[in-house]
Image (spheres, rainbow, N blue to C red):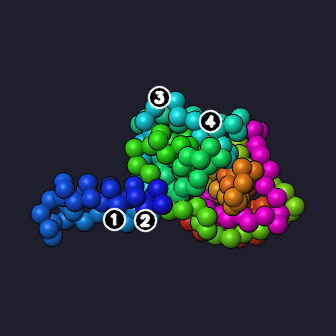
Amino acid sequence: MLKSVLSACLVAASLLVMSPAGSAQNQKPAQDDISIMGIGRATQVRFAETWIRFRPNPYNGEHLITRPGHDVATICWVMGADGKLWDMVFDHNQKYIGWTHEENLTVTSSTWCNSFGRGTTLNGTTAWVHLAPYEDWAHEVVHEGNNLASVCYYQQTANKRWDVVLEHGADNKLNRVGLTYSSYLDSPSSTPCTP
């Protein structure tokens, strides 16, 4: 409901500043369209050091930092463990994926993450996911049998392709997001994270 009220206020405010009807300037693309920079909706972070995490939980210890001026996209949102709205973001400059509070972003997503992504299963029983495309960086584990979705892919080299995987769920342990090798998935994404 909070998202609906916020969206209605933003629409009302935008109507006050629109150019004359019929002009190309007031033709706004749908918020959920893939932007020219890749998946998601273009946004900026508000603070010099904005943390992004594996889960929408401020007590989840591992994090990376994205900064103002980076090419960041917001993909979808959930209600976090702290009762605040969190957006899944992708930093195109650093190829980082993770969750951050919506208050850290200049533009937020209107897409709910609950059913977002392409349903997939693992080739094994577990897979490591990372906030950045480095296998030696900190990781968390996603499990076969959980509600997994592939969001987009990043082709790092000719032989190394990563998928953004979202482990859907309502409790704090789930809604985990990270990058894993596409070869670990039965149904990797067909959507590039970056153009």
Quadrant of the rendered image containing residue 187? bottom right
Q: Amino acid at mark 2?
A: Asp
Badge 4 density bin: few <14, some 14–19, many ≥20, Cα 10 Å: some
Q: Residue furthest right?
A: 125
Q: Amino acid at mark 1?
A: Pro
Cα distance between the residues tagged 1 and 2: 7 Å
Of the image marks 2 and 3, the number of the one nearer the N terminus = 2
Do the numbered discs 2 and 3 sit on residues whose CB atoms are within 8 Å? no
In the rendered view, tell whether residue 86 sits above or below residue 165: above
User: Residue at horizontal 69%, vertical 36%?
Assistant: 59
Q: Where is mark 2, residue-wise?
A: 33
Quadrant of the rendered image containing residue 120? bottom right
Badge 3 density bin: few <14, some 14–19, many ≥20, Cα 10 Å: few
Q: Amino acid at mark 3?
A: Ala
The question of residue 146 being in magenta is answered with yes
Q: Where is mark 4, residue-wise?
A: 64
User: Residue at horizontal 33%, vertical 65%?
Assistant: 29
Instruction: Give the residues drawn in magenta, as a range.
Output: 135-153
State the residue in front, 64 or 83. 83
Local SS, label 2: loop
Local SS, label 1: loop
Local SS, label 4: strand
Cα distance between the residues tagged 2 and 3: 27 Å
Do the numbered discs 1 and 2 sit on residues whose CB atoms are within 8 Å? yes
Q: Residue 161 in the image: x percent, y percent?
A: 67, 56
Say which mark, if any, is on residue 48.
3
Q: Residue 72 in the image: x percent, y percent?
A: 47, 46
Cα distance between the residues tagged 1 and 4: 30 Å
In the rendered view, tell whether residue 186 sits above or below residue 137: below
Of the image marks 1 and 4, the number of the one nearer the N terminus = 1
Quadrant of the rendered image containing residue 105? top left
